């Protein structure tokens, strides 16, 4: 494992991120959870298209790779082919870390040789855990174990637990600053889109927001097809849910 110097531990010296990407084996829903030491990670790393796939691009990331990968998945390319095409079209592929899950649950992931140590990834049944410039392999191992342990749960719960496990295992040597959780319904809209853009404990703040939103998800699932459902506060109050 790399010996981080005092200069290394200054915020911004390295691009350092850990991410879990998953597809629910029962419903086919996609989601991504991410945390990093920089601001606003939720706007740069996760890309999802319902029924098509999920893509996370990080390290010295090019956020344009996310929409490009989604377009290729939409054309029917499997995850491995998309990853190969991205690598061949990107002159800086060695600086990237990219994870892809396609509509069939196939996974493909690459950690470029120019990533800052520790950098690497793990894969399982419909999930990918990856990180760069993190304290050790234990971070991605913990995320993968969390994904497996919660396989019977919905994808948003599994991903929330995975990103917490990564942070608890040490995350980045200089801590985290932002985090995000994005999950799409098969109907084509995001049912969870939570971002913590600048916080000394972003995964803890993400958990606080998640716990408030999670009981309301049935309401937000129903409302597009039933506009007579009423206001969320009234719906929640009738069920003893705080908002």
Image: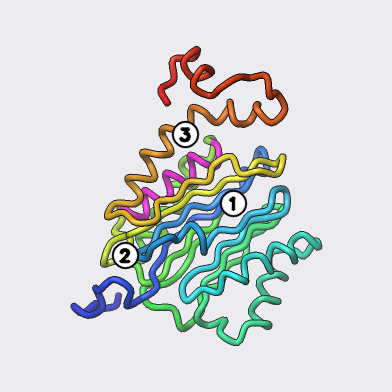
* Vertical comparison of 140 with 231: above or below: below
Q: Which residue is mark 1?
A: 125
Q: Are marks 1 and 3 in contact (CB under 8 Å)?
A: no
Give SS at disc 2.
loop
Label 2 crowd bin: few (<14), some (14–19), many (20+), radius 10 Å: many
Q: Residue at x 30, y 67 (%)?
A: 135
* Vertical comparison of 214 with 111: above or below: above
Which secondary structure dominates the residues rendered in magenta?
A: helix
| Image coordinates for residue 188, horizontal then vertical, percent | 70, 44
**238 horizontally vs 227: left or right:** left
Position of the C terminus, as image quadrant, is top left
Q: How many marks?
A: 3
Query: Which one is earlier in the sequence, the residue at label 2 or at label 1?
Result: 1
Residue 35, quarter of picture? bottom left
| Image coordinates for residue 3, horizontal then vertical, percent | 24, 78
Q: Which residue is mark 2?
A: 172
Query: Which one is earlier in the sequence, the residue at label 1 or at label 3?
Result: 1
Residue 25, quarter of picture? top right
* Vertical comparison of 72 with 191: above or below: below
User: Which residues lie in the magenta part?
Assistant: 154-167
Residue 55, quarter of picture? bottom right
Q: Nearer the viewer, residue 120 or 155?
A: 155
Q: Nearer the viewer, residue 239 or 110?
A: 239
Q: Which residue is mark 3?
A: 213
Farthest residue, direction top: 238
The CA span between labels 3 and 2 is 27 Å
Position of the N terminus, as image quadrant, is bottom left
Query: Which one is earlier in the sequence, the residue at label 3 or at label 2?
Result: 2
């Amino acid at each position: 494992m790399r010996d981080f110097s005092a200069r290394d531990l200054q915020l911004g010296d390295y691009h350092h991120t850990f991410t879990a990407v998953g597809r629910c084996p029962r419903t086919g829903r996609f989601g991504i959870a991410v945390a990093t030491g920089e601001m606003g990670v939720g706007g740069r790393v996760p890309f999802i298209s319902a029924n098509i796939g999920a893509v996370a691009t990080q390290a010295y990331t090019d956020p344009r790779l996310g929409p490009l990968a989604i377009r290729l998945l939409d054309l029917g390319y499997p995850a491995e082919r998309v990853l190969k095409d991205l690598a061949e079209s990107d002159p800086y592929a060695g600086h990237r870390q990219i994870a892809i899950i396609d509509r069939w649950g196939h996974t493909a992931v690459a950690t470029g040789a120019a990533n800052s140590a520790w950098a690497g990834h793990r894969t399982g049944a419909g999930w990918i855990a990856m990180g760069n410039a993190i304290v050790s392999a234990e971070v991605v191992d913990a995320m993968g174990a969390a994904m497996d342990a919660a396989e019977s749960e919905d994808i948003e719960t599994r991903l929330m637990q995975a990103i917490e496990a990564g942070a608890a295992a040490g995350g980045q040597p200089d801590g985290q600053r932002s985090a995000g959780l994005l999950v799409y319904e098969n109907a084509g809209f995001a049912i969870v889109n939570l971002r913590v853009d600048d916080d000394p404990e972003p995964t803890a703040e993400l958990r606080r927001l998640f716990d408030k939103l999670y009981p309301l998800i049935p309401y937000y699932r129903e409302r597009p097809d039933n506009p007579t459902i009423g206001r969320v506060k009234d719906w929640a109050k009738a069920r003893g849910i705080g908002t």
